[in-house]
Amino acid sequence: MSDKSFNCIRIDTKALQANFSIIRKIAGDRVPVMAMVKADAYGHGMVMAAGAFARAGCTVFGVAELREAVLLRQAGIAGDIFVTLGFAAEDTELLFRYALTPVIYSLEAARVLSGTATALGKEIGIHIKVDSGMSRLGILAADLSAFLEAILTLPGLRVAGIMSHFPESDNPEAESNEKGFAAFSAACSEMKNRCAGIRHIANSGAVLNFPDTWCDMVRAGISLYGYLPEGRPAPDSTKKVDLIPAMSFTTKILQVKTLPAGTGVSYGHTFRTKQPITIAVIPVGYEDGFSRLFSNRGEVLIHGRRAKVRGRVCMNMCMVEVTDVEGVRAGDEVVLLGRQQEAVITADDLAEAMGSISYEVLCLLGNNNKREYIE
Ligand SMILES: *Cc1c(COP(=O)(O)O)cnc(C)c1O
């Protein structure tokens, strides 16, 4: 049996490498770039993306869960691998076996880690996550002093760094940026008074907007995949970063037919033809990450022209109108993300149509289709 699919996500590994080089050049020689490869590298394939970044000189990687970090190591990725969401007590030993760097935000986890370190006769470097205004994971400022004091009494643990996260660094106007960085700086001083360690808070938005926040390392995600965190750059934007989107998504038309006026299309008949129209049926639906939110809103490219989604997106199929596109046949290529002739659809375009952000579009499409890699 063939495992071929009509649908193909193509990842340009050269684009990934080029984007890493761009971000590294921006950050400069003094500030290392951690490549965030969580969520299967935002849909690009964690191992392949990490390999591409490594070839471009990356030596620090960030994932969400321990299992991802183990997979990276087993695939031969060297350097530091940060596990940012914690770990289950029974998996603690894996952090040592695979030389991983845990991010710590609870005393319980620190105690478990210390216990394992002692039992193994090893030491492990940890990074402490503080909450400087995101109200997500991390120790609140008020609790940091006591937390540090407790951590520093635990054998086998070495505080190697402190980190936080910006909620709105994609918006240079947002008040939370300065406030959050001030809170983080205070936390860094607190650490410095007690122990050594590096500091990192900047995500892609802060890499591009706030050089003062780069500290000792930056953590880039979306920019490495070719997109700006704030979405499409404004037409008058002076910001010049030539990031290259690395993902494209294509499929092939299954059937083409002309429907008479007054015909309902797809579930619920939410689209009804006013005059005869020609539709192409394509094998892409919400199961393939092409959200049902694209019903009657999305667009695809056929013969270099835009074709609108008509009616609801089904699980494995949807219909697009090709009345104005000449000579469309079953088997013709459809581009859902990427370039076809002179036309292009970006993840920001798709995000706009579904009321979301490029991050989600990349995860949805990339993680629900067969991927192919080109050099
Ligand atoms: C995902 C993530 C980043 C990267 O954010 P981008 O906006 O994609 O650059 C940075 N830090 C942490 C902790 C993250 O989880």
Image (tube, rainbow, N blue to C red):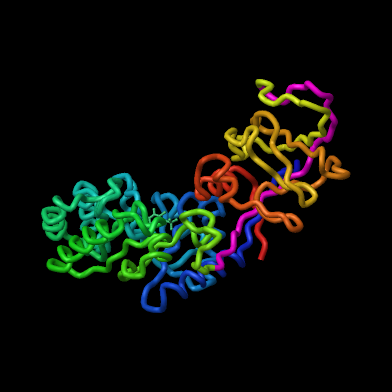
* Residue 286 as seen in the image, left or right of residue 253: left
Q: Which of 54 and 180 is in front in this view?
A: 180
Residue depicted at 21% across the width and 58% down the height? 183
Which quadrant would the C terminus be assigned to in this image?
bottom right
Q: Where is residue 324 in the image (x, y as percent from the top left)?
A: 82, 41
Q: Which of 306 and 357 is in front in this view?
A: 306
Residue depicted at 54% across the width and 67% down the height? 19
Q: Position of residue 277 (x, y in %)?
A: 81, 31
Seen as rendered, the residue at the extreme right is 327
Q: Where is residue 65 in the image (x, y as percent from the top left)?
A: 40, 49
Q: Which quarter of the picture shows residue 292?
A: top right
Residue depicted at 80% across the width and 37% down the height? 254
Residue 289 visible somewhere in the drawing: yes
Question: Is 195 inside the magenta-drawn segment?
Answer: no
Number of numbered tags placed on the structure image: 0
Against 16, residue 339 (above or below) is above
Seen as rendered, the residue at the extreme front is 236
Against 353, residue 54 (above or below) is below
The boundaries of the magenta stretch are 242-267
Which quadrant would the N terminus be assigned to in this image?
top right
Q: Nearer the viewer, residue 375 or 109?
A: 375
Residue depicted at 79% across the width and 36% down the height? 280
Question: Is 257 inside the magenta-drawn segment?
Answer: yes
Where in the image, quadrant-wise, is ligand 1 located?
Answer: bottom left
Residue 127 visible somewhere in the drawing: no
Against 127, residue 292 (above or below) is above
